Image (tube, rainbow, N blue to C red):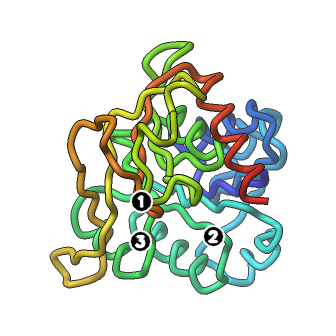
């Protein structure tokens, strides 16, 4: 996949390098030349430009990029302006960094659904989340085992865990399921709210659009995701 990471501070540069290590094409962008020099040999491309300037940004291969991450942290104004520009240019998938509070509400008001909080979330976690197609979120327990959030596939809709034989087919455990609904933040803007349904049992019914929280070995999780991709084709 192709990523553009805008803002190469500690979080942005770490995310760019980890995505590169996972065999992705990564373009890093920053207004500071010293950051470009520090990372240029560690990722696919490193470009020095002002991401708040539409003329400068127009030179980036945005149409061919799968994900744009606005990782600017120290300048909240530049972060919001860059995010607004990316929204205007209709990039395929936009993820933006924000601090809790007003900045986050502003991004939500702009229609940004995916927001990174580097104070709480590591670059490694986001790199794995972005690299594993179909994963909503993930938490690594050790080298072999993870807990991941995966969207319920179409073929599981309106079926119980007992009916789909999930444990027998994949040797994975569904810990719980979650439903994402539309709510509003303090500014009255639309915001996604996650409702956890409780500990899953054999009688738990799955529905399209919900999220399964799965525990298991990474190789088994990857097999599940690969099977889902095949079924989606």
* Number of numbered discs: 3
Residue located farthest toward the left when viewing the structure as drawn: 186
Judging by the rendered image, the residue that carries numbered circle 3 is: 77
Of the pair 89 and 46, the residue shown nearer to us: 89
Mark 2: give few (<14), some (14-19) or many (20+) Cα within 10 Å.
Answer: many
Judging by the rendered image, the residue that carries numbered circle 1 is: 207
Circles 2 and 3, Cβ within 8 Å, touching? The answer is: no
Give the image location of residue 208, x and y in percent. 47, 62
Vertical arrangement, residue 11 with respect to residue 47, above or below = above
Q: Secondary structure at mark 2?
A: loop
* Mark 2 vs 3, N-terminal side: 2
Q: Residue at x 43, y 79 (%)?
A: 111
Of the pair 5 and 221, the residue shown nearer to us: 221
**Relative to residue 96, is residue 22 drawn left or right?**
right
Vertical arrangement, residue 199 with respect to residue 6, above or below = above
**Relative to residue 77, is residue 134 drawn left or right?**
right
Q: Quadrant of residue 61?
A: bottom right
Q: Residue at x 69, y 39 (%)?
A: 19
- Mark 1–mark 3 distance (CA, rounded to whole Å): 40 Å
Mark whose residue sits in front, 1 or 3: 1
Of the pair 83 and 220, the residue shown nearer to us: 220
Judging by the rendered image, the residue that carries numbered circle 2 is: 51
* Quarter of the picture holding the C terminus: bottom right
Q: Secondary structure at mark 1?
A: loop
Q: Secondary structure at mark 3?
A: helix
Q: Quadrant of residue 35?
A: top right
């Amino acid at each position: 996949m192709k990523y553009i990471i805008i803002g190469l501070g500690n979080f942005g540069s770490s995310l760019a390098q980890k995505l590169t290590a996972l065999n992705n094409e990564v373009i890093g962008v920053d207004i500071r030349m010293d950051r470009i020099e520090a990372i240029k040999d560690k990722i696919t491309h490193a470009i020095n430009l002002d991401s708040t300037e539409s003329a400068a940004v127009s030179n980036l291969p945005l149409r061919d990029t799968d994900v744009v991450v606005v990782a600017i942290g120290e300048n909240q104004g530049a972060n919001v302006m860059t995010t607004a520009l990316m929204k205007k240019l209709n990039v395929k998938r936009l993820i933006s960094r924000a601090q809790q509070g007003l900045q986050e509400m502003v991004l939500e008001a702009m229609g940004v659904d995916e927001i990174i909080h580097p104070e709480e979330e590591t670059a490694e976690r986001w790199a794995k989340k972005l690299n594993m197609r179909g994963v909503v979120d993930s938490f690594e327990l050790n080298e072999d085992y993870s807990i991941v959030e995966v969207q319920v596939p179409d073929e599981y809709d309106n079926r119980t865990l007992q009916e789909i034989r999930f444990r027998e087919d994949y040797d994975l455990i569904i810990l719980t399921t979650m439903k994402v609904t539309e709510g509003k933040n303090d500014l009255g803007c639309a915001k996604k709210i996650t409702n956890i349904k409780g500990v899953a049992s054999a009688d738990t019914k799955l529905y399209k659009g919900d999220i399964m929280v799965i525990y298991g070995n990474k190789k088994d999780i990857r097999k599940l995701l690969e099977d889902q991709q095949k079924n989606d084709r």
